[in-house]
Image (spheres, grey):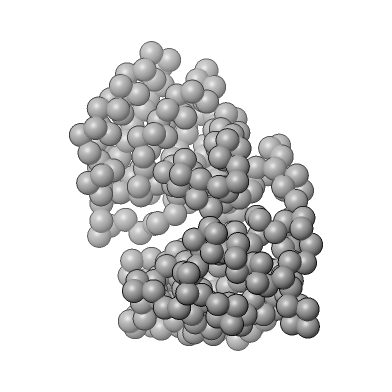
Amino acid sequence: MAADTPNDSSLFEIPPQQLLSAIRTAASGGDVEPIPKYLLARCGLLGESQLTDAGLALFKLAWVMRKDKEANQALGQALRQLNPLQVIEQELRGLGPVPEDGVLDLLHQHRAVSTETTVTDIRPTLRWLSGVGLLAYSTKLKTVRSLAPAPDAALAGEVQAIASMISPRTPFLNVVKLRRVIRPLKGVVWWADPHFGARALEELAEELRLEDVTEIRIISGDAENVISNKSLKDFERFQQEMSNYNIVAQWRVDRRGVRDWHDRWLGDDKVVWNVPPINTLFKNDYSEISPTSERPPFDQWWRRATPR
């Protein structure tokens, strides 16, 4: 089942204990093997050279406090954003127990696992995921049941059903969910995304209540396709239009070697959301929009970043 390069389906190739061991290796500055390195980075536990804050918290839980049950549950929650788990949560919601063969066919359909993957390959991971409460797997009946809450059970501030999955099944609603996040933003609006796409400027221009906004601050990485001449021209037009409403729009670049963040956030001075890359959202890949529990240090990143 192993692929030439690690991807989200690599989840089924290694046991969770190996991921926790990789957390310990990373904490001590050791070299992490490619598959654990990919999965930990994909889940926001490992940065370019060290553990993230979430990774350090998991390290302390697993290796300092030695709370095995809690550490496995925390690891499971981190792994939820991987495509195979997104497919299972989203597609099986409300269907009740589904035969494991049917789950495998579903994963194949969404290209969430390789065509060579078998039920035997995924079964150990399904058992572990069931043990940490991410899904229900019956070893007797060989069935899988989604434990994801119904969409209308999720509340985030005053916006109902917004902390939810981005799915290929709902291409229109994917954009609606993003727009519901954008519309209430006030004051200084922040969008931090290492791979910020100029397509996001359209959503800001169309959905923000401009009379409630004073400033728009965009922070990106420095990849060539991000800070291209085309994106600069798009931003200059956006910047000029915002100035007509007395809104200051700025885009700054946090350079490689300095940038120590990898997720994407959208918010204002009171609320912040984790959001998928704009291209992921418009391609309808699996992802998630959810409110954050801790505010990123936007001001720190802003001060060190370079204006476009």
> Residue 102 or 160: which is nearer the viewer?
102
208 sits to left or right of 155:
left
Identity of the residue drawn at 64% across and 62% down: 88
Q: Is residue 52 visible?
A: no
Look at the image and tell me in which quarter the C terminus lies: top left
Look at the image and tell me in which quarter the N terminus lies: bottom left
Q: In the displayed structure, would residue 211 be above or below residue 6?
A: above
How far across and down, in percent of the image, does residue 20 sit? 51, 81
Identity of the residue drawn at 52% across and 17% down: 211
212 sits to left or right of 193:
right
Q: How many marks?
A: 0
- Quadrant position of residue 101: bottom right
How far across and down, in percent of the image, does residue 184 sit? 60, 30
Q: In the displayed structure, would residue 181 be above or below residue 133?
A: above
> Residue 233 or 273: which is nearer the viewer?
233
Q: In the displayed structure, would residue 279 be above or below residue 208?
A: below
Q: Is residue 296 visible?
A: yes
How far across and down, in percent of the image, does residue 185 sit? 55, 31
85 sits to left or right of 144:
left
Identity of the residue drawn at 60% across and 77% down: 119
43 sits to left or right of 305:
right
Identity of the residue drawn at 35% across and 59% down: 260
Q: In the displayed structure, would residue 91 be above or below residue 59?
A: above
- Quadrant position of residue 218: top left
How far across and down, in percent of the image, does residue 11 sit? 51, 73
